Image: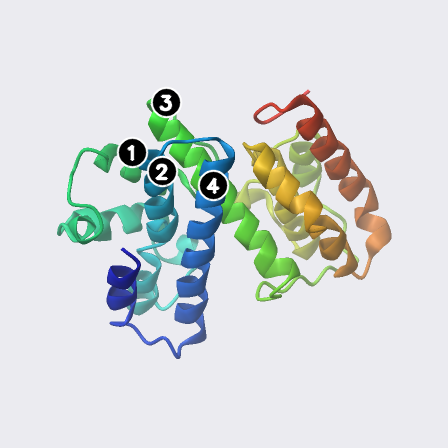
Amino acid sequence: MIEEFKKYVSNYNLENKNIKLKYEHSFRVMEQSVNIAKSLGLDETDRRLAELIGLLHDFGRFEQLKVYNTYNDSKSIDHANYSVDVLFDNGEIRNYIKTDSYDNIIKAAIKNHNKFEIAEGLTEKELMHSCIVRDADKIDILYLITILKEIVIKDTNDEISKEVIDQFNNKSTIKNATIKNNNDRVISYLSFVYDINYPYTIKYILNNKIMEKYYELLNNKEIFKPYFDEINKYMVKFIKEGELNVKA
């Protein structure tokens, strides 16, 4: 599986920083997907599925950059849907898994990994694997911000938009359409926590002091302190109650 993925990506220019970034991101999301699956006590089949979905969740990103010269979905194409198309339209997926018995799970998880909300009507397995890869993806995006600093955060003196504040206060992730400035973007990444599904993910953030490192990157800390305080309270509540998406 891994060798097949490396072979596929070798068709693209790994000296291109953006290609390299998504290549390495894919492996880290794969690793975190496996960690989450193990934390849930899943059997070998579901662990391997989580591993595969994590590795392939951004499969269409490489072709997206080649065709559209951007990773910006709003200026090109929904990369999750495109990943499913690239994998399944010409049978590329069969290079990674011979049976088609799990195709619906793989498709559902990859399609839903970047959506504002997970689609309704999924089977139990489709929903679980969608939640796993969403958590793993968020872990790595926060890692890219705080550890690798590949996603650069530049806060300003701008006021946080009311729509963003309202969504945050409702314990929701932030809709891209409501983001008006850099400070809104800071809150949008912070709000990832409200869409986390599993204790492993919250524990990873806490144990690795991700939010503390995020906070230290900011210049206008007084603007954001109440939001970070609220997120920290939420994470403690999540671990204490051990529930999915604690909203109360």
Badge 4: how crowded within 10 Å, few (<14), some, or many (20+)? many
Please give the label number shown on residue 124. 3
Question: x%, y% of residue 188?
Answer: 62, 46
- Helix, strand or loop at mark 3: helix
Specify whether residue 214 is in view. Answer: yes
Real-space CA distance between mark 2 and mark 3, rounded to the nearest whole angstrom: 11 Å
Q: Which residue is drawn at 60% across and 33% down?
A: 199
In space, the residues marked 4 and 2 are separated at their CA atoms by: 8 Å
Query: Three-letter amino acid code at disc 2?
Result: Ala
Name the residue at 47% across, 37% down: 38
The correct choice, above or below, for 71 with respect to 205 in the image is: below
Marks 3 and 1, how far apart at CA? 10 Å
Q: Which of the labelled discs sits on residue 105, or is there none?
A: 1
Residue 134: mark: 4
Q: Do the residues labelled 2 and 1 touch (CB within 8 Å)?
A: yes
Mark 3 or mark 1: whose residue is earlier in sequence: 1
Image quarter of the C terminus: top right
Q: Residues within 10 Å of mark 2 (few under 14, many from 20)?
A: many
Q: Seen from this angle, which residue lies furthest bottom?
A: 15
- What residue would you read off at disc 2? 109
Secondary structure under the numbered disc 1 in the rendered image:
helix
Mark closest to the chain's N terminus, 3 or 4: 3
Name which of mark 4 and mark 1 comes first in the sequence: 1
Examine the rendering and report whether any part of residue 108 can be seen. no
Residue 5 placed where, x, y %?
A: 28, 61
Disc 4 or 2, which lies upstream in sequence? 2
Horizontal and vertical percent position of residue 189: 62, 48
